[in-house]
Amino acid sequence: MSLTWEKIDAVPGWFGFQSYAVWRALLEHQQAETLRGDLFEIGVWKGRSAAVLATYRRPEEKLYLCDLALDERAVHAALRSVAVEPAGLVPLSGPSEELAGKLDLKAMFQSVRWFHIDGEHTGISVWRELEVANAVLNAGGIVVIDDFFSARYPANTTEAVRYLEKNPFHFRLLAVAFNKGYLCRPEAVADYMDYLAGDATLAMHRHGLRATIFKSTGPWDTDAVGIVDYVEDVGPLAGPDRTPHLWHAIQTRPAWSPFWHLRYLAERLGLRRRGGA
């Protein structure tokens, strides 16, 4: 694979280096798990982030690209700049609110594994785009929302959170990282959390990013993690603020079992009693 950050950085756009490394780590995990499905992006501009997605597209998969006035010539140039031929593209010019009328969403049921929302940045558009994502995303897929927690576009966050609250069985918030929110299906949380607790920081490091993953609480509160630039004091994985080196909430799959947490609390209480005796 000839993809490098320098090649992506040469394409006009705002897709940042940290997101480049996070995307590659997550896309490689999907690849390792042999997850198949199309890739979808709303908000393409000149094809900067689309070039990353195109690199991970398999021959039988499609790459849907939606923009108000899709610049296909620029997108083709961006893809060729990373040594990818613009094959399998489905160009969609026009506002994202028209997608439900343009696409056969029933035929596309569970056909998409990556859905990037970087469109109109209004609350109503984010909600509609999440509805489209829910109609097409497969069980192991990821939805990425741009400008998540952005002070410039608060509706991207408020409406995404509102959607999650109203539809808890559609998506769960998986991670917040470098201005983007990452969602997945509820049944995929454990698999992605295992990856984040294991090889994810190594994968990001291979692509030039030293990162720390914060899991500040257990799944009784929220499953989501935060990914930030490397914090020397805590290392690649960090637990709750009071005990940052206690990674029980992120380390292994049994951590996601309520029974495991009851056993963990019982052990903690037992240690305290023995220590005080």
Image (cartoon, rainbow, N blue to C red):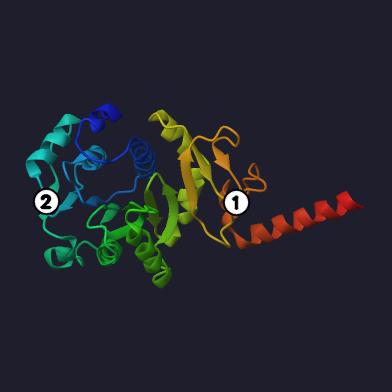
Q: Which residue is label 2 attached to? A: 91
Q: Are marks 2 and 1 in contact (CB under 8 Å)?
A: no
Circle 2 sits in a helix, a strand or a loop, which is it?
strand
Picture residue at 35% right of the left edge, 65% below the top: 159
**Three-letter amino acid code at the position of disc 2:** Pro
63 left or right, relative to 115: left
107 and 222: which is toward the camera: 222
Question: Residue placed farthest to the front in the image?
Answer: 152
Q: How many marks?
A: 2
Q: Is residue 40 above or below residue 198?
A: below
Which of the 4 quarters of the picture holds residue 234? Answer: top right
Expressed as whole percent of the image width and height from the top left, the position of residue 49 reads 25, 41
Please tell me the numbered disc located at residue 249. 1
110 and 73: which is toward the camera: 73
230 left or right, relative to 96: right
Say whether residue 68 is visible.
yes
Question: Residue placed farthest to the right in the image?
Answer: 277
**Three-letter amino acid code at the position of disc 1:** Ala
14 and 130: which is toward the camera: 14
Q: Is residue 25 above or below residue 164?
A: above
